[in-house]
Image (cartoon, helix red, strand yellow):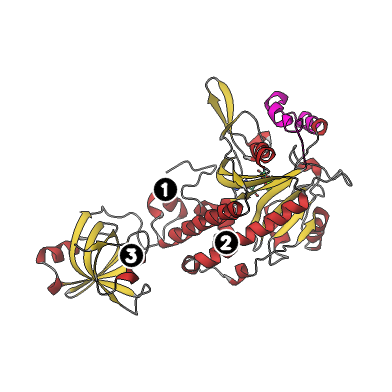
């Protein structure tokens, strides 16, 4: 019996008879020949059905095949220089597993809403396939980096009793008669982890009831968040630049075909190496002024502002020392200039905007308590978090990298909705 092989491994089987299992992507006919393009998730290969080589029934079956029909076929692998894969299969037998109904996604142009409604099928198309393989590599490389640097994975809960990133974007759920919120960030728990293990990271889905309908916002997105004890803002920025460049270099090394499918200009990625430019909030404001962008001093940067700032640099740029007034309650202020928080954001090049947000954390009990009060946050829900400042408090820092925005940048995708298998936005909960 022929060996069952994945198309991606086909180069090992030249001249041998193999069985492949997959779906029909496309078919061309020419006289007594049928050219089937078959994909199995790993790759796509051309399979040639020659009338004289197969039974009459098999040839008749071939003619019935519809796009996305599932099939098992056996044949001999031969080298073929014209095909992108370098090989094709001369078919001997073909078995139809299921004859597909008329496939809703055709070669013609479809609107984004139609494609998003059919996201469960759209995932099969070559562009979506390439994006999600790059996403896979980004997540793999991100975890690889922290594992290699001896950070311990400490998972944060998804149900939480308190807000981490402001109370306006909380998703509330009923938790056996009391209120719970879907987590906005695993950070506060990662801080407890850092005091237990020194260096930790968490990775998981995070939720924000974002009312904004932009190309950068999802209501459910994935974040990877390192947190380390005895770490200041400079350490944090250095970790962030080394981490991001490791991710970019890994994608360049392991996902060239996918980057080509997406026609990504990889020269813009090849230069991503530390150190990254680091600028003070005031320098970023000056850039906006020079570019005649209307901006109110003291505000946070909006999408357009981030684009203008990031376009000044080939590398991701780190903006630090944001005004404390616009930043989260847990951020430590700079003792030398307390109007600024020891905060940093990393903005991706080419106008992709913020991919990382991070800071040094307030480590003094009294100061943190005061901030919690100033932000009108429920003190009792934060009692455990305040405890961390009572029992061996140390300077510590961390950040969160949003996976989808990182995928959008590295893959060169305009809209964040294509960077996650099943996006959740203000207007979409289906499929
Ligand atoms: O800047 P943010 O809000 O930072 C935090 O949540 C910190 N607690 C992280 C930490 O220090 N451990 O979010 C971090 C990143 C952003 O830079 C962005 O990449 C992504 O999460 N992000 C979103 N991605 C998609 N849709 C949204 N609505 C996002 N909000 C934030
Ligand atoms: Mg942020």
Query: Label 1, label 3: how many angstroms apart (C-alpha)?
Result: 29 Å
Residue plotted at (67% across, 33% down): 167
Residue at 42% of width from left, 44% of height from top? 431
> Where 118 falls versus 362 (above or below)?
below
SS for callout 2: helix
Between label 2 and label 3, give the one nearer the viewer. 3
Residue 118 in picture, x, y percent from top left: 39, 50
Say which label, 2 or 1, has the lower sequence index: 1
Mark 1 vs ligand 1: CB below 8 Å = no
Q: Is residue 336 above or below residue 388?
A: below
The magenta stretch spans which residues? 368-394
Answer with mark 2 or mark 3, whichever residue precedes in sequence: 3
Q: Is residue 121 visible?
A: yes
Of labels 1 and 3, earlier in sequence is 3
The residue pinned by badge 1 equals 117
Whether residue 166 appears in magenta in the rendering, the answer is no
**The residue tagged with tag 1: helix, strand or loop?**
helix
* Numbered mark located on residue 7 in the image: 3
Q: Is residue 209 left or right of residue 165?
A: left
State the residue position of label 2: 410
């Amino acid at each position: 019996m022929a060996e069952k092989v994945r198309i991606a491994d086909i180069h090992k089987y030249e001249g041998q008879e193999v069985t492949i299992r997959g779906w029909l992507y496309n078919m061309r006919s020419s006289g007594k020949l049928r050219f089937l393009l078959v994909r199995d998730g790993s790759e796509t290969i051309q399979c040639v059905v020659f009338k004289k080589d197969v039974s009459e029934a098999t040839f008749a079956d071939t003619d019935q095949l519809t796009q996305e029909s599932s099939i098992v076929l056996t044949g001999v692998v031969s080298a073929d220089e014209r095909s992108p894969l370098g090989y094709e299969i001369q078919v001997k037998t073909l078995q139809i597993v299921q004859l597909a109904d008329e496939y809703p996604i055709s070669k013609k142009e479809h609107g984004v809403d139609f494609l998003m409604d059919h996201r469960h099928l759209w995932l099969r198309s070559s562009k979506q396939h390439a994006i999600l393989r790059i996403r896979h590599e980004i997540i793999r490389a991100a975890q690889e980096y922290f594992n290699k640097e001896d950070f311990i994975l400490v998972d944060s809960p998804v149900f939480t009793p308190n807000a981490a990133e402001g109370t306006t974007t909380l998703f509330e759920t009923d938790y056996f008669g009391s209120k719970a919120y879907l987590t906005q960030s695993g950070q506060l728990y990662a801080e407890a982890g850092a005091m237990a293990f020194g260096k930790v990271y968490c990775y998981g889905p995070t939720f924000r009831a974002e009312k904004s309908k932009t190309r950068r916002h999802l209501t459910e997105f994935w974040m990877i968040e390192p947190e380390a004890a005895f770490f200041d803002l400079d350490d944090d920025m250095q970790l962030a630049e080394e981490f991001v460049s490791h991710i970019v270099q890994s994608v360049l090394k392991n996902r060239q075909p996918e980057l080509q499918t997406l026609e990504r200009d990889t020269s813009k990625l090849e230069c991503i190496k530390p150190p990254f430019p680091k600028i003070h909030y005031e320098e970023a404001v000056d850039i906006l002024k020079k570019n005649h962008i209307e901006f109110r001093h003291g505000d946070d940067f909006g999408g357009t502002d981030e684009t203008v700032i990031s376009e000044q640099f080939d590398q991701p740029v780190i903006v630090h020392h944001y005004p404390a007034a616009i930043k989260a309650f847990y951020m430590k202020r700079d003792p030398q200039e307390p109007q600024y928080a020891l905060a940093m954001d990393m903005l991706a090049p080419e106008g992709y905007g913020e991919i990382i947000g991070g800071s040094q954390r307030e480590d003094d009990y009294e100061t943190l308590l005061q901030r919690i009060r100033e932000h009108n946050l429920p003190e009792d829900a934060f009692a455990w978090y305040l405890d961390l400042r009572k029992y061996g408090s140390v300077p510590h820092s961390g950040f969160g990298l949003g996976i989808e925005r990182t995928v959008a940048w590295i893959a060169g995708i305009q809209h964040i909705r294509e960077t996650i298998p099943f996006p959740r936005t203000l207007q979409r909960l289906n499929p």
